Image: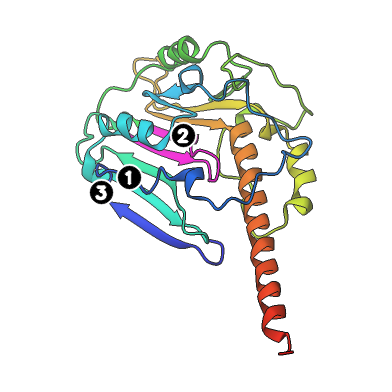
Amino acid sequence: MRPGQVPINVRRLLWLPLLFVTAGLASQPALGQAALPAGVPAPPPGGINPAKLPDTNGVHLGMSVDQAIAVIKGLYPRDLTTVTSEKLADGTVWTRNIKADNKQNCNASCDSIVVSFSPPPNPVQVIGIERAINSGSGTPPTVDAVVASLRQKYGKEVMSAVGVMAWAYDEQGQPINPQGPSNWRPADCARAGDLEIPGPTPLAQILPKLTRDLCNRGVFVSVQVLPGTAIQGVPVAPQIFIHLGEKSLEFRDGVVAQQYAEARAANQKQQEMKKAQQQAAPVL
């Protein structure tokens, strides 16, 4: 947590109107927005359309906070849903993530989800989804059935290894086939929240490293299928872990948030210097 931030954990209040969350850019002081540095992916023409981006159980990358809440509300018990928000230095409340599960009633199948959001001042949107499915005491699906279902949902994978599959798309939802060095795997890119921005390190200092990272361009999905004891010789999948990441959006909005924080700090310092000069002026 950065200095000046106060965590606000909101439980059992998910279904109240979250007007303070959606303030976004409108609540920010008019500092102006710097142009995106070279190497940072520009938004697609017309902006993000969540309906075109991958989802799991109806929760799409690119959704707003309200849109994600509406879907989660119909999927998970209300008293097992937690919204975690953070008050930023300028007073803006940022909804960082939503966590939900059905562990009160999951004898047949346990399902949990974590939805992560991009930082303001840009509109707050879903940048990452983590979902875990456990068959519990129920009969698990076969590995072949899971793989077939994943291919039907996400298309042809760009990577397939033992128990792991991965897909890649552009920000308009079109499949892509990103290439990189032999030690780079698209399956490692889907997890959101690994960026160092916004944070205390100056953007200029960390930007070269971030622009070189191939994971910061594109939309990724990875699925890990953990096999269990075969049933009548047929491999089954009692546990499935799904990660979705809108990494271009996460990178872009992180840069904008860092630019805003640095501009605000510089503006505040300038105001303090001006005030000090005025106070120090002699009476003539």
Which amino acid lies under the numbered mark 3 shown in the image of this protein? Leu
The residue identified by callout 2 is 129
Residues at circles 3 and 1 in contact by the CB criterion of under 8 Å: no
| Vertical side of 129 occupied by 151: above or below | above
Residue 18 got which mark?
Answer: 1
Q: Which residue is drawn at 55% across and 53% down?
A: 29
Residue 13 got which mark?
Answer: 3
Q: What crowding class fits label 3: few (fewer than 14 Cα within 10 Å), some (14-19), or many (20 or more)? A: some
Q: Which residue is drawn at 61% across and 14% down?
A: 175
Q: Which colour scheme is used?
A: rainbow
**Which is more N-terminal, label 1 or label 2?**
1
Left or right: 67 with respect to 35? left
Residues at circles 2 and 3 in contact by the CB criterion of under 8 Å: no
Answer yes or no: is residue 196 visible.
Answer: no
Residue 62 lies in the magenta-colored region: no
Segment tinted magenta in the rendering: 111-132
